[in-house]
Image (cartoon, rainbow, N blue to C red):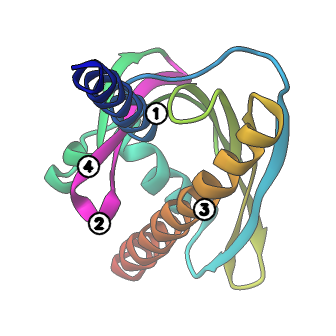
């Protein structure tokens, strides 16, 4: 009969570990203990866009400061809005689309040259990012850079190694969408 108790303890531990992992991956249960913090760079990623800087800025800012398209409303929800900053929830499919990670970030706008992001809640304790917009010979150069930080020394570094490539891939897809929409709008002018 002792094996029944041991099996129950193993089952409870397994369920707890699975729930903890799901909570961490989806951002529902963030882990921010501030011990053993390690940071790693995100990017840089550079995209040249054949559109004026103001148009590119407007495309980036629209889901936050303007009227978002239906597709963007499924990905971004503005929770609080000020004159130059918003608190927004970002939803990203993970695990092959079986789960949705929800992060909360502040987004600060410095028209027309910069958009800064700071993670408030997510799968890692800290992320800071920026989109810097400069005028370029063919339009606008958008440079993405950031930093992702994790806690708990090597364990956190391992977790950051899993999160960072997915994070950067999500940003790359967003930059591609910004480029496409800004060039479309610019062609209509």
| Residue that numbered label 4 is attached to | 99
Task: Residue 73 in the image: state x and y as whole percent.
Answer: 21, 43
Q: Residue at x 45, y 70 (%)?
A: 182
Q: Is residue 184 left or right of residue 137?
A: left
The CA span between labels 3 and 1 is: 18 Å
| Mark 1 burial class by Cα count in 10 Å: few <14, some 14-19, many 20+ | some
Instruction: Answer whether labels 3 and 4 touch (C-beta < 8 Å).
Output: no
Considering only order in the chain, which callout, 2 or 1, is on the residue closer to the N terminus? Answer: 1
Considering only order in the chain, which callout, 4 or 3, is on the residue closer to the N terminus? Answer: 4
Of helix, strand and loop, which one carries label 4?
strand
Q: Is residue 76 left or right of residue 119?
A: left
| Mark 4 burial class by Cα count in 10 Å: few <14, some 14-19, many 20+ | some
Of helix, strand and loop, which one carries label 3?
helix
Considering only order in the chain, which callout, 1 or 3, is on the residue closer to the N terminus? Answer: 1
Q: Nearer the viewer, mark 3 or mark 1?
A: 1
Q: Is residue 80 left or right of residue 116?
A: left
Q: Is residue 91 left or right of residue 109?
A: left
Task: Residue 68 in the image: state x and y as whole percent.
Answer: 25, 45
Q: Between residues 152 and 77, which one lies in front from this camera angle?
A: 152
Task: Residue 185 in the image: state x and y as whole percent.
Answer: 37, 72
Q: Which mark is residue 168?
A: 3
| Residue that numbered label 2 is attached to | 96
Q: Residue at x 73, y 40 (%)?
A: 155
């Amino acid at each position: 009969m002792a094996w029944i108790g041991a099996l129950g303890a193993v089952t409870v531990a397994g369920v707890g570990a699975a729930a903890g992992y799901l909570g961490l991956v989806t951002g529902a249960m963030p882990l921010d203990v501030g011990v053993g913090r390690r940071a790693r760079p995100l990017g840089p990623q550079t995209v040249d866009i054949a559109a004026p800087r103001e148009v590119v800025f407007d495309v980036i800012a629209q889901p936050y400061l303007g009227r978002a398209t239906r597709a963007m409303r499924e990905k971004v929800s503005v929770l609080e809005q000020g004159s130059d900053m918003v608190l927004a929830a970002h939803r990203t499919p993970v695990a092959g689309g079986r789960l949705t990670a929800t992060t909360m970030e502040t987004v600060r706008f410095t028209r027309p040259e910069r958009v800064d992001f700071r993670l408030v809640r997510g799968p890692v304790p800290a992320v800071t990012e920026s989109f810097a917009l400069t005028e370029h010979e063919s339009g606008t150069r958008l440079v993405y850079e950031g930093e992702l930080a994790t806690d708990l020394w090597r364990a956190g570094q391992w977790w950051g190694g899993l999160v960072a490539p997915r994070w950067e891939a999500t940003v790359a897809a967003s930059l591609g969408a910004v480029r496409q929409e800004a060039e479309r709008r610019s062609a209509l002018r």
